[in-house]
Amino acid sequence: MTRQNQIIALVAVLALVAGFVFASRFKQPAPAQPGAAEALLTAQLKDTQEETHSLTQYRGKVLVVNFWATWCPPCREEIPLFIQAQTKFASNGLQFVGIALDNPQKVANFAQEFAINYPVLIGGINESEALRKLGDPGGGLPFTLIYDRKGNLREKVLGGLDKQRLEQLIAPLI
């Protein structure tokens, strides 16, 4: 191997390591600010039909709140998983709620196309700020919160979930 190839290989390895460090650092949610998890539960959010809802209506259930957008590829990948889990675990007291940070009409069309079987609410500027307070300082999507039956925030996940990880997180709570 020539000296030039060795340098190229070294730079490639360093770039790969830096990429893993960067990705893992920014995929870890930060601690939530005091009161942020409770504030989200009491926030008044509209659905695609302009009806107002509060997440407090799901107290007594294991609540999975997913911040997402129609343009977000990892969001689009995990939503079918959430639809399946909602069907599978609803009778065990599990409730999904999606909070879309997107255009309401696009969200309504997406929800219909994907046959989303859980409530979809529309977020705005206040919810973007809530993301930061909840531990997502960069406002990355998807961002998923899991509350226990008493309304305590138990898990935060920045980035997409797969079936195994989702079930591992909710199993102890349902």
Image (cartoon, rainbow, N blue to C red):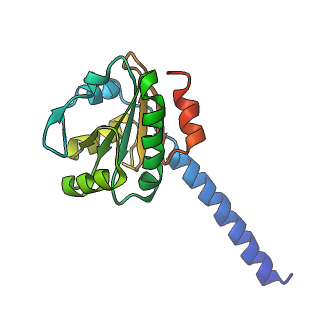
Residue at 68 percent across and 64 percent down: it is 14
Q: Quadrant of residue 129?
A: top left
> In this orientation, does residue 54 appear?
yes
In the image: residue 80, left or right of residue 59: right
Q: Is residue 37 above or below residue 81?
A: above
Q: Residue furthest left?
A: 50
Where residue 163 appears, as percent x and y from the top left, is: 56, 42
Of residues 124 and 122, which is closer to you in this image?
A: 122
Where residue 102 appears, as percent x and y from the top left, is: 26, 54
Where residue 65 appears, as percent x and y from the top left, is: 37, 35
Which quarter of the rendered picture does the N terminus lie within? bottom right
Q: Quadrant of residue 59?
A: top left
Q: Quadrant of residue 168?
A: top right
In the image: residue 145, left or right of residue 40: right
In the image: residue 24, left or right of residue 12: left
Q: Is residue 119 above or below residue 4?
A: above
Where residue 44 appears, as percent x and y from the top left, is: 18, 32
Q: Is residue 108 above or below residue 88?
A: below
Badge count:
0
> In this orientation, does residue 102 appear?
no
Of residues 57 and 142, which is closer to you in this image?
A: 57
Residue at 55 percent across and 47 percent down: it is 25
Of residues 82 and 150, which is closer to you in this image?
A: 82
In the image: residue 64, left or right of residue 19: left
Residue at 28 percent across and 27 percent down: it is 41
Q: Is residue 31 above or below residue 125?
A: above
